[in-house]
Image: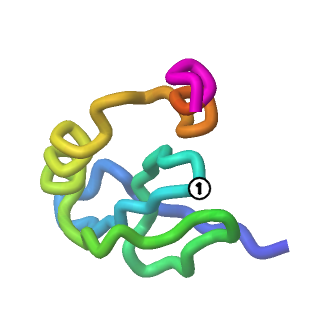
Amino acid sequence: MRTVSFDFDNPEARFKVLVNDEEQYSLWPGDLPVPGGWAETGVHASKEECDEYLRKTWTDMRPKSLRLALDGE
């Protein structure tokens, strides 16, 4: 089994911001392939820049299916 180690605290590290079908987001190491069920948002930057993107974009943490159910759609 292959294991991967990644230093999330390294100031030189680059990340991708991923999103899934439930419109939930995740930071992912920039040089690793995107895992199944996730898609790239186009953001590939430092952790601080990715965090800022998430603060502005991911304003409702509820999964999409829950938001739709509660909104009666």
> 21 or 51, which is in the foreground?
21
Left of 9 or right of it: where is 71?
A: right
Residue 35 lies, in percent from the top left, at 64, 70
> 66 or 39, which is in the foreground?
66
Q: Quadrant of the N terminus?
A: bottom right
Q: Which residues are magenta?
A: 69-73
Q: Is residue 5 above or below residue 63?
A: below
Q: Amino acid at mark 1?
A: Asp
Q: Is residue 71 magenta?
A: yes
Q: Which residue corresponds to mark 1?
A: 21
Left of 32 or right of it: where is 2?
A: right
Residue at 16% across / 41% down in the picture? Answer: 56
Left of 13 or right of it: where is 21?
A: right
Residue at 19% across / 51% down in the picture? Answer: 53
Q: Quadrant of the C terminus?
A: top right
Q: Is residue 8 above or below residue 73?
A: below
Residue at 43% across / 67% down in the picture? Answer: 29
Residue 71 lies, in percent from the top left, at 51, 23
